[in-house]
Amino acid sequence: MTTNEYYINRCINIAKNGLGSTRPNPTVGAIIVHNNKIIGEGFTSNYGGNHAEVNAINSVVNKALLKESTIYVTLEPCSHYGKTPPCSDLIIKTEIPNVVIGCIDDNEHVSGKGIAKLKDAGCQVTVGVLEKECKNHHKRFFTFHNKKRPYIILKWAETENGFLSPEKKDEQKPVWITTPYSRQLVHKWRTEEQAILIGTNTALDDNPSLTVRDWTGNNPIRIVIDRNEKLPKTLSIFNNQAESITITSKNIDFNKPIAKQICELLFEKQINSVIIEGGAKTLQTFINENLWDEARVFKGNINFINGTKAPQLSGTIISEEKISTDTLKIYTND
Ligand SMILES: NC(=O)C1=CN([C@@H]2O[C@H](COP(=O)(O)OP(=O)(O)OC[C@H]3O[C@@H](n4cnc5c(N)ncnc54)[C@H](OP(=O)(O)O)[C@@H]3O)[C@@H](O)[C@H]2O)C=CC1
Ligand SMILES: Nc1c(N[C@@H]2O[C@H](COP(=O)(O)O)[C@@H](O)[C@H]2O)[nH]c(=O)[nH]c1=O
Ligand SMILES: [Zn+2]
């Protein structure tokens, strides 16, 4: 790893602290280095707050050192007035001479303009350090801007013999296939996404609340498919712990492919990521319409004799790990 890569990698790690609280804005990480020493760090504040560069610059105790420093940042510094003034202007004003950038911001308001501004002011700018890793870190933001839809994560838990739920259930709650450790990880994931979506049968059969209880962070917006508006408002998904949106035949046409229409609806609502937690029909609908980016599939070590079969998916496995007695495989769609 080169020195530049080492520092950009640090920016990515710092940025992860802001995942889920800056939405729909990207969660950027920035550090300031003077003579091979990190003198400032920052990540994007909650939506509407400071950008990462501002937080990093503010955190430097001896501001006189800025004139001899390098600022590292995962995404091109902004050049436009949004909720805050342009970061490229601040870098120029504070006279930081060197700027190292992970990837270009292809949002039409920025798209190279931040870099041009910095260069025009005489800054030494290096672009594309750990570009792939930075683009991956900003995957929600890039998918939203380039594909005009949210980043879509499919998630389910299946038994060793491939079932999501048993044929018969006595109670209106989930039958747990995975261990509490995996469930805690799922709650962490919920904090990282702007929305969570389930199908009608899951809402009725499991009565899930879809909130974050085993981790600290924001609850996602809960979205449920309810073609005929038959779901009782007493279900936990409609409680006041988080926002809920219902997708009915009033806002989409159920005679046409629905995943595409749901994506359009979420794009209109500025939702840049969604985790789809089932059931089988809903997950398979998004797979069949090829509207998914990542699938996180748990296999627990129990079996059901019969029941709802797990979805069928083909993708590339990018990681496989053991979580207690569960196996978690992550697929990407490429
Ligand atoms: N192990 C796990 O990870 C999970 C397990 N589950 C289990 O899965 C079971 C539910 O799965 P499943 O029955 O497949 O149900 P879903 O939750 O996917 O709901 C499917 C229903 O949604 C409505 N819908 C209408 N159009 C569509 C469409 N095009 N695509 C999808 N849904 C549409 C339909 O209801 P209508 O006909 O009324 O309009 C349909 O029957 C439950 O028993 C639950 O316990 C659920 C989530 C995760
Ligand atoms: N059964 C099962 C899962 N079920 C999923 O979790 C939802 C329950 O959410 P909540 O009410 O917030 O706890 C449920 O409706 C379904 O989407 N998830 C898993 O990781 N492992 C499991 O074994
Ligand atoms: Zn900015």
Image: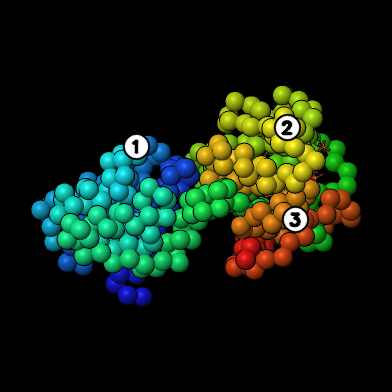
Query: Which comes sooner in the sequence, label 1 or label 3?
Result: 1
Tell me the SS state at disc 3.
helix
* In this picture, residue 154 sits left or right of residue 189: right
Position of the N terminus, as image quadrant, is: bottom left
* In this picture, residue 216 sits left or right of residue 293: left
Tell me the SS state at disc 1.
loop
Mark 2 CB in 8 Å range of ligand 1?
no
Q: Residue at x 38, y 47 (%)?
A: 109
Q: Which mark is residue 288?
A: 3
Dot 2 corresponds to which residue? 248
Which of these two is toward me, 296 or 291?
291
Q: Quadrant of ligand 2?
A: top right
Q: Residue at x 52, y 39 (%)?
A: 270
- Please determine whether, in this image, residue 132 is positioned above or below residue 114: below
Dot 1 corresponds to which residue? 83
Amino acid type, label 1: Lys
Amino acid type, label 3: Asn
- The answer for how far apart the CA atoms under marks 1 and 2 are is 34 Å
Locate residue 290, reporting x and y percent. Answer: 69, 57
Which of these two is toward me, 70 or 160?
70
Which of these two is toward me, 135 or 209?
135
Mark 3 CB in 8 Å range of ligand 1?
no
- The answer for how far apart the CA atoms under marks 1 and 3 are is 39 Å
Q: Residue at x 61, y 58 (%)?
A: 294
Query: Which comes sooner in the sequence, label 1 or label 2?
Result: 1
Locate residue 322, reporting x and y percent. Answer: 63, 64
Query: Which comes sooner in the sequence, label 2 or label 3?
Result: 2
Say whether residue 175 is visible.
Answer: no
Tell me the SS state at disc 2.
loop
